[in-house]
Image: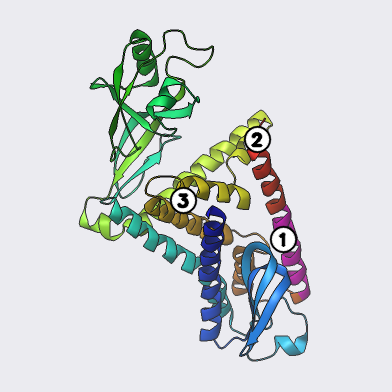
Amino acid sequence: MFILVFIITILILVVIHELGHFFAAKKFNIKVLEFGFGLPPRAWGKKIGETIWSLNWLPFGGFVRLLGEDEVDKEVLDNTRSFAAQPVTKRMLVVVAGVVMNLILAWLLFYIVLGAQNFKAQVPLLSDHKFAGVSQTNEKIILIGDVVPNSPASQAGLSSGERVIAVDSEEVLDANQFIEITKQKAGQPMQLTVSDIAKSDQRILEITPRENPPSGEGPLGVSLGTFEIANLEYKEPLQIALSGPIHSYNLITYSWEILAKTVSYSFAQKDITPVSQNVAGPIGITNIVKEILSVKNPLIPYLDFMAALSLNLAIINILPFPGLDGGRFFFLLLEAITRKKAHPTIEKYVHTIGLAILLGLIFLVTLSDIKKLIPQ
């Protein structure tokens, strides 16, 4: 089921992105040769009208192939319906149309997610970040990590990822306080109040800490973590009206801040592990989908995840790297400034090399995903 959901998710994101290119090309009367799902080699294709609709063997994205794009034949380049024959402004619009579609999808999904949560959201804080255009309050929470099988926690029904709220109606503020309480109450039944992270679904469990637990397990048989989260609330009418774009902006700026710090730390430590642990490919994303579908009410968390994926797809694609939309846009920007086109053969080889590098990176990230799933 989760593999099927993952495939459908990627399909939706790719179709939305490529439809941006497709409709923009049609708007400017540019001939669309092929609309492909996945990357070549081709597994199946059918020509409808003047466009081939194809399924390809490598399930990493998709593409729209336009007449006169990555072409060196002068007759094709001069064709009035070719991409190359269009004014530079039209070509720029065609190139960025996919990114715009992914941004719009992310905004719409964030509107749905935030609306379902009364325009509130929670974000784990890994730095002292201030989010823009929203009311922010920070707090520390205690989360249950691993639950040891056949331990008091397991027998009481405590689950990994739940938030500790109180013991015998006394609020618990940090992990050390909780550990001391469980030690003091060893051998005595106690009422443990837990909830989801948002505290919207609280429940009370009766649990008895062990007096002589096995080494390394503790009285309850759980691992704990204290985390700081930012509670975000869109209160004002203007904040609510712009919550989709504002939330997207906040997640982008926050993610780049964390990524920059992670990369900087990796360079300082001369170790790429911190970066690889925070990057996920197809297998890693499939595993995340599996975790989302295992929660009690997965629809809103899934839509939130899908919005984040669409947002990331837009940002990655606009980067000025050869083979990506941003790389093509960079060539067009140079053309607009210098009023000189790049040589089509040179541009074709640059994008081909860039695409090969991207496929290599996808392969390495996939190997990293597999490594994460293998028990150490």
> Which residue is the site of mark 2?
273
- Residue 36 coordinates in the image, percent (x, y): 64, 73
Q: Amino acid at mark 2?
A: Thr
Q: Is residue 166 left or right of residue 88?
A: left
- Residue 189 coordinates in the image, percent (x, y): 31, 15
Q: Is residue 309 left or right of residue 304?
A: right
Which residue corresponds to the image point at 36% horizontal and 31% vertical from the top-left? 163
Which residues are drawn in magenta? 345-360
Gap in Å between the C-alphas at discs 2 and 3? 22 Å
Which residue corresponds to the image point at 43% horizontal and 49% vertical from the top-left? 251
- Residue 187 coordinates in the image, percent (x, y): 36, 10
Name the mark on residue 66: none
Q: Magenta stretch: residue 75 in it?
A: no
Q: Amino acid at mark 1?
A: Gly
Name the mark on residue 354: 1
Q: Nearer the viewer, residue 116 or 138?
A: 116
Which residue corresponds to the image point at 72% horizontal and 69% vertical from the top-left? 40
Q: Magenta stretch: residue 354 in it?
A: yes
Q: Amino acid at mark 3?
A: Ile
Name the mark on residue 252: 3
Q: N-terminal of the two: label 1 or label 2?
A: 2
**Contact, mark 2 vs mark 3 (Cβ under 8 Å):** no
Helix, strand, or loop for circle 1? helix
Gap in Å between the C-alphas at discs 1 and 2? 24 Å
Q: Nearer the viewer, mark 1 or mark 2?
A: 2
Give the crowd class for mark 1: few <14, some 14-19, many >=20 residues within 10 Å.
some
